[in-house]
Amino acid sequence: MNHQVETRRTRADRVAAITARLNRLPPSRYIWRLVMLFSLCGFFEIYEIALTAFLSPGLIRAGIFHADAKGFLGLADQASFAAATFAGFFVGAALFSSVADKYGRRSVLTCSLLWYAVCTVVMAAQNTALAVDLWRLVAGIGVGVQLVTIDSYLAELVPRTVRGKAFAVNYGLMYLGVPAAALLCWLLLPTDPALMAGWRWVASFPALAIPVVLWVRRLVPESPRWLLQRGQLEAAEQVVASIEARVSSEVRGQLPMPHIGSPEAEGQADLTELLRPTYRRRTLMLIALNIFQALGFYGFSNWVPTLLASQGVTFVKSLQYSFAIAIVYPVAPLLIAFFADRFEAKWQIVAGAVGTAVFGLLFAQQSSPAMLVALGALITVSNILLSYSYHAYQTTLYPTRLRARAVGFVYSFSRLATVLSGFAIAIVLRDFGTTGVFAFIAICMLVVVIAVGVFGPQTRGLTLEESSR
């Protein structure tokens, strides 16, 4: 008995020591290269999300979608297309995110990216609205798993001193997928290049993700924290030693001394733990955050061309204005990176929600192209501040053994809410116009402000082991 206690104590000491060595690492070029590799994977995911708004005009032009309310439930086909997209995200996040806790971050990241790339190319070959929506849903499952895995992976590998900046940079690079999608749609949707409808070329673009899978699998290490939780101490030791050697050679100096704290509790992940006293309050807060930020965020971003058209903008002009607004997506997070770690994440979430509500209500009153683009850009900046900060925030609130599963669980409510938002926005836009849409979004943002501002714990400056207790 005493031998078993001593063995467990020795094991816990080793886990704490390895974790401390990982926590003490300073920022370095190697760490930022890892961030960029994660961003490259996420680029295709954001490209896919952006197509939810931008691809529909091309499908309408090809005769696959209806321009008016002749689709499912008497609504526009855009509503069912968006619903299929985020239903796939929901299934991926809710039912399959736990595989990243079981099989490792690297394997699940690369497999989910490959799944998505293949399925979205198959979607590009379809000829009916039902088939397009079906393959969109299947592709979305891979995207749903991928996003949760990237967030967990990133939080576990980057130093706490630059965690906010790393998430901001990651999202800035990922969001290059938005202007990429907007530009390709602007150039290709009105035409039929190389004897194939432009929308099919746009939808086939993610085939480029296939070689990325091989590259990422070769260069990105498995998460040491995940290895420790799975009892693979020697493998974790090797990964941390390799990272230390790279970082040490780049900073050209002795690494800081590690400060050994208490290790995370070991054990198998169990979703019921989310509703036990330790995590119940933060879980309910994150469910509310995910539901209402999704209704507001995607209520605008998925409907940009449609909302512009409802303000009197023509088809071609709506694509041009959408591209102008889309340029903001990769730029804003890179600017946010300069102050990301200076302010508490929960208050950045609140600020983003307030900005989305205020600028959205102003957008609804405009008809001038310049003001529509300017306010659309400000809504986008606010949405990005909200999005990057809450993704960084929720990954810090759960332990490694539970992180991907827990984040997938709360994040799945975001995906489910986005499924409903497609129909909700379609109904509100039809019955109350653009003003009604942004009033709806403002109410959703108010719920976010209350949930996070009142009930969210503070995490700035804490290690993952400290903030997840």
Image (spheres, rainbow, N blue to C red):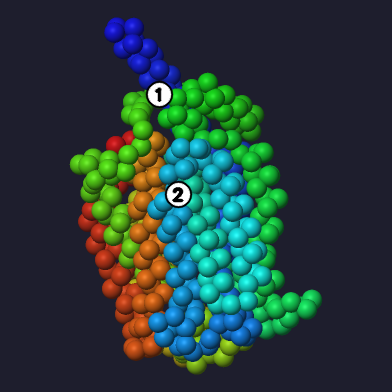
Mark seen at residue 124: none
Q: Is residue 107 visible?
A: yes
Residue farthest toward the right in the current orientation of the protein = 194
Q: In the rendered view of the protein, which quadrant contains the N terminus?
A: top left
Q: Residues under labels 2 and 1: Cα distance?
A: 29 Å
Element class at badge 2: loop
The one nearer the camera, 239 or 172, is: 239
Which residue in the protein does label 2 denote?
96
Is 113 rendered above or below residue 136? above
Q: Quadrant of residue 220?
A: top right
Q: In the rendered view of the protein, which quadrant contains the C terminus?
A: top left
Residue type at the position of mark 1: Ala
Which residue in the protein does label 1 denote?
16
Question: In this image, 390 relative to 302: left or right?
Answer: left
Instruction: Estimate the x, y position of residue 141 in percent, counting from the top left.
Output: 50, 57
Q: Residue at x 27, y 68 (%)?
A: 446
Whether tag 2 and tag 1 are in contact, CB under 8 A, the answer is: no
Instruction: Estimate the x, y position of residue 353 in percent, counting from the top left.
Output: 35, 66
Question: In this image, 282 relative to 73: left or right?
Answer: left
Residue farthest toward the top in the current orientation of the protein = 2
The one nearer the camera, 249 or 273, is: 273
Q: Residue at x 36, y 33 (%)?
A: 268
Q: Quadrant of residue 120?
A: bottom right
Residue type at the position of mark 2: Phe
The one nearer the camera, 346 or 204, is: 204
Instruction: Estimate the x, y position of residue 26 in percent, counting from the top left.
Output: 52, 35
The one nearer the camera, 420 or 327, is: 420
Dot 2: few (<14), some (14–19), or many (≥20) neighbours within 10 Å?
many
Instruction: Estimate the x, y position of residue 455 in percent, counting from the top left.
Output: 23, 53
Q: Residue at x 41, y 62 (%)?
A: 415
Q: Residue at x 22, y 42 (%)?
A: 276
